[in-house]
Image: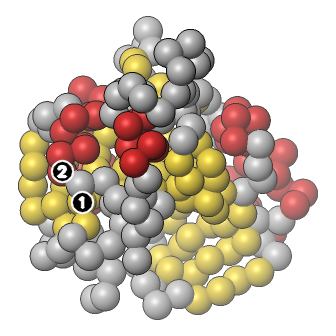
Amino acid sequence: MKQIMTACCLALALGLTGCEPSSAPPIENLPWQITLSPAGNPQVFQVELGKSTLKDLMSQVRSFPEMAVFAHEGGQRRLEAYFGTQRLGLFDAKLLAELQVDDATLTALQTNATKREGMASGYWKHTVAEEDMAVVNALLIRKLVYIPAISYDAEIITQRFGTPTERLPSNDVNVEYWFYTDKGLAIALNAKGSEVLYYVPIAGFAALKQELLEAKPKND
C-alpha cells in the first residue's frame, strides 16, 4: 500500500508556507527540479543524464548500488545499478540507474559475474564482480528510474511537473504514461501501484517512449 504524504510534506512540496520558517534554505533534490544543461541534457538529483557517471551518482546519494547485467533469452541486455530506497530531498524513493555500455563490456561483465539468477520475466541476472567495479563506475548514466514511496496523483503531478506533452495509455489497463519531451521525463501513473518516473537525455527520449509503450504488463 502506498504511503500517504503528510500534510507538512505536501505543503513543502507544493511550495506553500506555514510548515517552515521563511528563512529556511531551499529544498533540493526534488523529482520535479529538472533543468537543462548547456548541452541540452536534463539535470536532476545533482547529476546530468548522458554526462554524469555512476561514480558521480554514488557521490550524490552516498550509497553503493547492487550492480547486475540483465540478459534476456531474446538477446536484449542492459546494465543496472540498483540503489534501493534512498532519501532524496524530502522523500524516500527507490532509485535505479541504467548505464551506457557497449556489447564487449557487457559480455566481459557477464563472463566475470559472481552469481547468475533466472527471473520470471525471461531475463538472467548476472551480478557484477567487485573487480569490475572500477570499469562500471566510469560509465555514463543513460537512464534514471525513480519510484516514490508517496502517492503522486494527477493533480500533484500537473502542479509540480506541468502539463505533459502527451498522455497515452499503456498495455497495462491500470497505467497511463505522461510524457514530458522537453524535460526528458516520462511518468507512469498506476491506479493500483506506485508511480514510476523515468529520466533520460533528450536524444534518447523517443527510444524510451517506444520502450514504455511496447512493454507488456508485469503479470504477463
- Closest to the observer: 113 or 56? 56
Residue at figure coordinates x 23%, y 50% from the top left: 209
Q: Amino acid at mark 2?
A: Ala
Left or right of 1: which side holds 131?
right
- Find residue 76 and name its label: none
* Whole-percent x, y for residue 35 in the image: 40, 20
Residue at figure coordinates x 70%, y 83% from the top left: 116
* 137, above or below 52, in the image: below
Is residue 86 visible in the rendered image? The answer is: yes
In this rendering, which labeled residue sits more in front, label 1 or label 2?
Answer: 2
Left or right of 18: which side holds 108?
right
* Whole-percent x, y for residue 11 in the image: 38, 37
Residue at figure coordinates x 55%, y 59% from the top left: 94
- Find residue 154 and name its label: 2
- Residue marked by disc 1: 189
Q: Secondary structure at mark 2?
A: helix
- Closest to the observer: 202 or 8? 8
